[in-house]
């Protein structure tokens, strides 16, 4: 990591002596845009960070008590992307520096910080076809694939935190086609290791298979707005994306497939069970109004992990159940936005978790789109129908 950080000032110094062309240098377009003299590669460097203040009150009888207040650097990241050899071979490297970015050390990644978020190449090998290889986000629910820098509320929903399939190591095949008029269809397929990012000591279970279909009946969104929340481009005509994802994690060895505890038995072997996750989602935008809806469902062949005898529980349980997330917002012409979200979680009884509902109201000010913004939201959460928590969050994003 020290070597990587030392390379950054070298990139700055090299611009004046080696760059053929420097473009898109305005705020939000990347801190460095470097193109080789012979046009055989390019590098764009774009750091970003998010700072948060959070205040939380738990419900205690008839009152909210036990207040907690803290400030955190939620994300601090360095992103490099560009092309290599020719413009049909694209790469992306993203590194995380905050404690939330790098946490999760365990015996299966040699107990080291998980700095690498993305390290992927994308080869446009034919018209409308792409082949990806490396570590990156799987084609899962739309909320997860939306960058954390392009969110409408302070952070993603409870649906995403409990049931998403996140990043993994593997390959992906992507295709898009026109079905007539403005109607677009995109298909995405992935085969990956199945244990999440930065794993070095595996594959402990089986492989993970993901397929996603996206339908855009009214054509493409402006500036890839189907994967960016809030209607910052103020779509002049209605735009809609409908997405369907199927994920099968064969002999998954972690409680949530890609994440959670490894289900280790007393004899140090690992319990595994097939896990299936399904997502149905939609993104809609028109004239400042935006809507996102998601449904998730996860099942497992055997939720309760057992010892080698197949009877004695180990204490680990696969997180199964379903969730619904509905989110909408309206962007005023002065770049202020009001947004709201409703999320429900229903867990299988075997998990021992109670049903949860959360209501969130947010207020945003976009200074330079998602690149420089101030956000706040207030959430009210109930567990098993009883009042549980109120949380207020305030923060800002800065993306070069």
Image (tube, grey):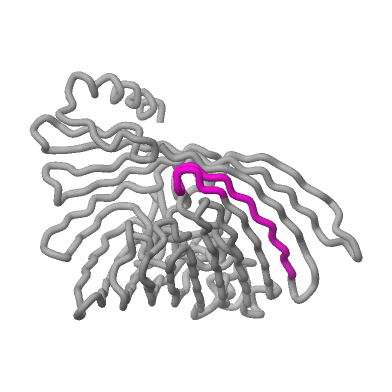
Residue 229 higher or lower than 395, as above or below: below
Q: Is residue 320 highlighted in magenta? A: no
Residue nearest the observer in this picture, 218 or 157? 218
Residue nearest the observer in this picture, 397 or 8? 397
**Left or right: 349 with respect to 102?**
right
Q: Residue furthest left?
A: 38
Q: At x 17% / y 23%, what residue is drawn?
A: 18
Number of numbered markers: 0
The location of residue 148, given as percent across then percent down, is 47, 52
Query: Can you tell which quarter of the image residue 156 is in?
Result: bottom right
Q: At x 11% / y 36%, what residue is drawn?
A: 39
Residue 276 visible from this viewpoint: no
Q: Main secondary structure of the magenta part?
A: strand
Q: Residue furthest front?
A: 333
Image quadrant occupied by the N terminus: top left
Which residues fall within the magenta stretch? 365-382
Residue 186 higher or lower than 93, as above or below: below
């Amino acid at each position: 990591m020290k070597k990587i950080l030392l390379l950054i000032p070298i990139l700055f110094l090299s611009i004046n002596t080696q760059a053929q062309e420097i473009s898109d240098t305005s705020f939000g377009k990347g801190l460095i845009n470097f193109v080789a003299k012979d046009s055989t590669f390019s590098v764009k460097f774009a750091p970003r960070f998010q700072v948060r203040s959070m205040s939380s009150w738990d419900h205690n009888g008839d009152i909210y008590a036990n207040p907690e207040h803290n400030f955190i650097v939620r994300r601090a990241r360095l992103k490099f992307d560009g092309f290599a050899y020719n413009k049909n071979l694209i790469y992306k490297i993203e590194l995380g520096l905050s404690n939330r970015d790098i946490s999760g050390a365990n015996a299966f990644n040699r107990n080291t910080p998980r700095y690498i978020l993305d390290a992927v190449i994308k080869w446009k090998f034919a018209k409308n076809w792409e082949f990806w290889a490396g570590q990156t986000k799987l084609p899962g629910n739309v909320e997860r694939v939306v960058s954390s820098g392009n969110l409408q509320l302070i952070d993603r929903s409870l649906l995403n935190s409990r049931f998403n399939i996140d990043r993994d190591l593997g390959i992906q095949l992507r295709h898009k086609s026109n079905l007539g008029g403005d109607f677009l269809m995109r298909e995405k397929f992935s085969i990956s290791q199945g244990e999440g990012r930065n794993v070095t000591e595996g594959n402990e279970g089986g492989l993970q298979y993901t397929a996603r279909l996206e339908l855009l009946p009214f054509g493409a969104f402006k500036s890839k707005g189907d994967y960016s929340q809030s209607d910052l481009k103020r779509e002049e005509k209605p735009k809609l994306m409908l997405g369907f994802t199927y994920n099968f994690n064969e002999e998954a060895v972690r409680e949530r497939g890609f994440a959670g505890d490894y289900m280790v038995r007393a004899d140090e072997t690992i319990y595994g069970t097939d896990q299936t996750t399904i997502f149905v989602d939609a993104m809609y935008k028109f004239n400042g109004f935006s809507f996102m809806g998601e449904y998730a469902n996860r099942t497992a062949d055997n939720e309760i992990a057992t010892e080698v005898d197949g009877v004695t529980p180990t204490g680990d349980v696969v997180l199964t159940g379903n969730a619904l997330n509905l989110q909408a917002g309206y962007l005023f012409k002065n770049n202020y936005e009001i947004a709201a979200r409703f999320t429900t979680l229903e867990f299988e009884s075997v998990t021992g978790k109670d049903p949860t509902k959360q209501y969130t109201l947010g207020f945003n000010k976009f200074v330079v789109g998602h690149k420089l913004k101030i956000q706040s939201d207030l959430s009210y959460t109930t567990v098993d129908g009883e009042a549980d928590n109120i949380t207020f969050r305030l923060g800002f994003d800065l993306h070069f």
